[in-house]
């Protein structure tokens, strides 16, 4: 049993506790913001009833969250504004953040004992691919048992995953009354000025396919065995694959194997992309709390062997990743960066025509997912919704035990085959929530 009925009890706008100064009225988007799709970075944080009840009554908890949200918005002022994409800016007009309170007609354990991204979808203010002009949305969900789930959406047009978690943790610190000042860095526009991207549409892939998202757990021992296995397949002079590289290789190979009769997947060129954080790669390096889209894609066209596998996928990705150094980023900031746009557009068109099959990997492992504490302790579990794009795989650390949760998003047809792949299932944990 999962989430079946969610009743919206009330919705209000939470505005910054003090007005945004007039000279900050327009928050301009950067070149990297331009390249980002207008989707919503989304996560739901689940808290047990006893943990919350030890600190607040439920209605008090919501009141405290709204008050601290109002306060933290003065530091993250673009989040209370409205996105105007055709003008490449956020109008920081302090219209506020939609904040919904709901009742969920089931127990929290019904959801988190065997979490489903489809259930997570219902606990968020927006669908992941819903195009809205609000930059931030919050949904405060109360379960029949008294447990709560806080669902948060932040527009990817203004910030990447690390920006999302930095905001959430700043909000949580404000809620706890932490004395440490909140650090912000809202300078992406000056670092990466926008460019003429006429003819390019980052949103072109949105809503193209009906996608099924599933969560699979890999225990630490299984991941280590995969690392050992793939280490034997690379040259001694090469660095052994990381946890994420080994798991990416395994899942990529199993999707190819499970869908091998699918002509689109089996006999086309394959493009594997992986997201990298460029903050530490810049000169000088940006602080971790720098807010904006500071990511690029590492792209590789892996070659499949006679078995239809690519066992050194990690090497391919690492080689591409190593090309992104301070000189590369400097060129991107200058006019030379425009040379990458035709290639991006060309690949997007080839993917749309089915000439290239793209697999997209992203990892939020080691990100501060479970550091969120609104004053009643860390979440029992936190998870993302279904992504609305095919062949997208997201990795997240389990809360304990050193394992990894893989969120695999495929078309309905491909997921049905993938879930029956015996070699894949043999590596997946059959235990409940980690």
Image (tube, rainbow, N blue to C red):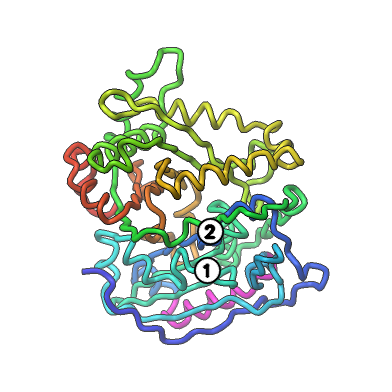
Q: Residue at x 76, y 67 (%)?
A: 26
What span is in magenta?
Answer: 56-75
Camera-nearest residue between 242 and 310: 310
Label 2 sits on residue = 203
Magenta span has 39?
Answer: no
In the image, is 204 to the left or to the right of 243?
right
Q: Residue at x 53, y 58 (%)?
A: 203
Q: What kind of element bears circle 2? A: helix
**Spot occupied by residue 214 in the image (x, y as percentages of width and height):** 30, 54
Where residue 421 sits, quadrant-wise, is top left
Camera-nearest residue between 422 and 49: 422
Label 1 sits on residue = 131
Q: Main secondary structure of the magenta part?
A: helix
Q: Are marks 1 and 2 in contact (CB under 8 Å)?
A: yes
Q: What kind of element bears circle 1? A: loop
First of labels 1, 2 by sequence position: 1
Height in image: 5 above or below 400?
A: below
Height in image: 72 above or below 283?
A: below
The mark closer to the camera, 1 or 2, is 2
In the image, is 154 to the left or to the right of 32?
left
**Spot occupied by residue 213 in the image (x, y as percentages of width and height):** 32, 56
Q: Residue at x 47, y 80 (%)?
A: 100
Magenta span has 72?
Answer: yes
Camera-nearest residue between 422 and 175: 422
**Spot occupied by residue 53 in the image (x, y as percentages of width and height):** 38, 75
């Amino acid at each position: 049993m999962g989430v079946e009925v969610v009743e919206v009890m009330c919705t209000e706008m939470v505005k910054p506790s003090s007005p945004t100064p007039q000279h900050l009225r327009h928050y301009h988007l950067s070149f990297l913001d331009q390249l980002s799709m207008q989707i919503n970075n989304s996560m739901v944080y689940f808290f047990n009833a006893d943990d919350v009840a030890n600190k607040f009554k439920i209605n008090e908890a919501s009141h405290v969250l709204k008050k601290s949200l109002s306060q933290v918005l003065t530091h993250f002022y673009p989040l209370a504004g409205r996105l105007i994409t055709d003008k490449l800016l956020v109008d920081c007009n302090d219209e506020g953040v939609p904040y919904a309170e709901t009742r969920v007609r089931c127990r929290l354990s019904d959801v988190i004992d065997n979490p489903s991204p489809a259930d997570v979808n219902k606990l968020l203010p927006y669908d992941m691919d819903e195009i809205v002009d609000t930059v931030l949305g919050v949904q405060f969900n109360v379960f029949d048992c008294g447990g709560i789930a806080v669902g948060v959406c932040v527009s990817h047009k203004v910030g990447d995953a690390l920006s999302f978690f930095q905001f959430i943790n700043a909000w949580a610190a404000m809620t706890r009354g932490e004395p440490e000042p909140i650090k912000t860095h809202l300078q992406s526009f000056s670092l990466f000025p926008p460019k003429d991207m006429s003819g390019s549409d980052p949103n072109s892939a949105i809503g193209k396919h009906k996608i099924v998202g599933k969560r699979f757990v890999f225990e630490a021992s299984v991941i280590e065995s995969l690392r050992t296995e793939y280490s034997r397949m690379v040259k001694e002079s090469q660095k052994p694959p990381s946890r994420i590289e080994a798991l990416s290789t395994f899942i990529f190979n199993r999707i190819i194997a499970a869908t091998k009769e699918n002509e689109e997947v089996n006999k086309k060129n394959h493009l594997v992309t992986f997201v990298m954080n460029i903050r530490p790669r810049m000169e000088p390096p940006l602080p971790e709390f720098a807010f904006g889209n500071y990511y690029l894609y590492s792209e590789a066209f892996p070659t499949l062997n006679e078995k239809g596998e690519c066992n050194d996928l990690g090497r391919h990705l690492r080689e591409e990743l190593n090309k992104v150094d301070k000189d590369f980023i400097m060129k991107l900031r200058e006019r030379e960066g425009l040379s990458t746009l035709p290639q991006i557009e060309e690949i997007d068109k080839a993917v749309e025509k089915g000439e290239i099959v793209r697999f997209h990997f992203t990892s939020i492992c080691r990100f501060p997912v479970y550091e969120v504490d609104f004053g009643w302790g860390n979440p029992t579990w936190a998870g993302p919704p279904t992504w609305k794009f095919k062949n997208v795989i997201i990795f997240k650390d389990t809360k304990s035990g050193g394992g990894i949760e893989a969120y695999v998003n495929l078309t309905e047809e491909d997921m049905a085959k993938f879930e029956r792949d015996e070699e894949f299932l043999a590596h997946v944990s059959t235990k409940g929530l980690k």
